[in-house]
Amino acid sequence: MKGCTLLELLRFYAEAYLRLAKELQDLEMCLYADRLENVHAGKEESVLHEPEHAKLVLISAKMSCEKIGLQVSAVHAGELLTSVARKRLTSSDVKALHENIDRELSCHFFVGISEDRKAFYCESLKGWEEITAKFPEATEDIEEMNKCFALCRYSAAVFHSLLVIEHGLVKFGNLLGVIDPKVGWDASYRKLESIVNAGRNENKTGLEFSSLEQLNVCVQAMKLAWRNKVDHAAGKPQVMGGGFAPYVAEEIISTTRGFMRRLSEIS
């Protein structure tokens, strides 16, 4: 494996590493006890009593190290498997492997995700299935939006939320008959506003006018709420200077989901 995701590193460190560390420690203790027994019985110190157990522990260690790119430790575990095959593994060998894994892990930087943010990262598309089915092109930005929020990158989360909305408005603009060469938020926004201002009798879109009115209110509210933080120059949304408080970013994500659900029902 050439690389690993942040989630793979976190899961390895939080789950697999603790389990693996205990397995290596237990194996080390068993081998040390074997050594004492062999010495007492006049046998070679490195003779294994339970080679299959040692083999399973080392296979687990090798696979875990390979999964997150601890290449040196993976090779080390493979070498010890050869020792098991020759029934020559010692407690010192296992201790050296454990120390090597710790040493190699120290070269990585780990961050933690709180329990209340875990779903945003691990299940970033959960609750958005209806929206991704209708607007598949928005899937990547939905995923990035939620993952950025989980990692406390609030401005980035808001940026991706704007792109999610833009994906929806571009597709919605096709239904409204947008002909602006610069497709995007502004083009659809202006067209929707003009249709609503023209009145029910002038609605030629084939869409229910009351729904258009409601969507127009939503778009107006979003522009009003975010006007100091978001620039729509040239029809492309971008987050301007300054940051977003966590609760503001979360509310924007929630608003984004509600708005996109409304669009999915109409589009």
Image: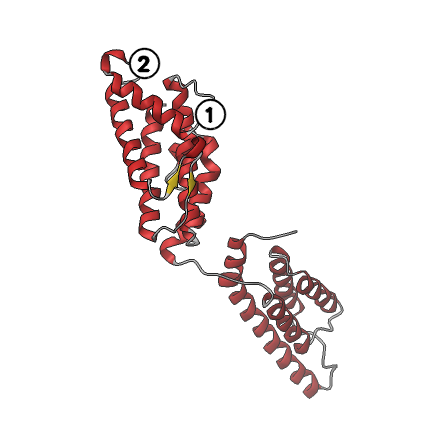
- The way the protein has been coloured in the rendering is secondary structure
Q: CA distance from mark 1 to mark 2?
A: 24 Å
Residue 68, x across and y down, in percent: 60, 57
Residue 106, x across and y down, in percent: 58, 68
| Most foreground residue, 144 or 63 | 144
Query: Dot 1 lies on which element?
Result: loop
The image quarter containing residue 215 is top left
The image quarter containing residue 43 is bottom right
> Would you place residue 39 above or below residue 215 in this image?
below
Give the labeled residue for mark 2: 206
Query: Dot 2 lies on which element?
Result: loop
- Is tag 1's residue or tag 2's residue first in the polypeptide sequence? 1
Q: Residues within 10 Å of mark 2 (few under 14, many from 20)?
A: few
> Would you place residue 229 above or below residue 21 in this image?
above
Give the labeled residue for mark 1: 182
Relative to 13, is 208 on the left or the right?
A: left
Q: Residues within 10 Å of mark 1 (few under 14, many from 20)?
A: few
Q: Residue at x 38, y 19 (%)?
A: 175
Residue 50, x across and y down, in percent: 65, 71
Q: Amino acid at mark 2?
A: Gly
Q: Is residue 181 visible?
A: yes
Relative to 236, is 46 on the left or the right?
A: right
Relative to 86, is 28 on the left or the right?
A: left
The image quarter containing residue 132 is top left
Which quadrant would the C terminus be assigned to in this image?
top left
Q: Amino acid at mark 1?
A: Lys
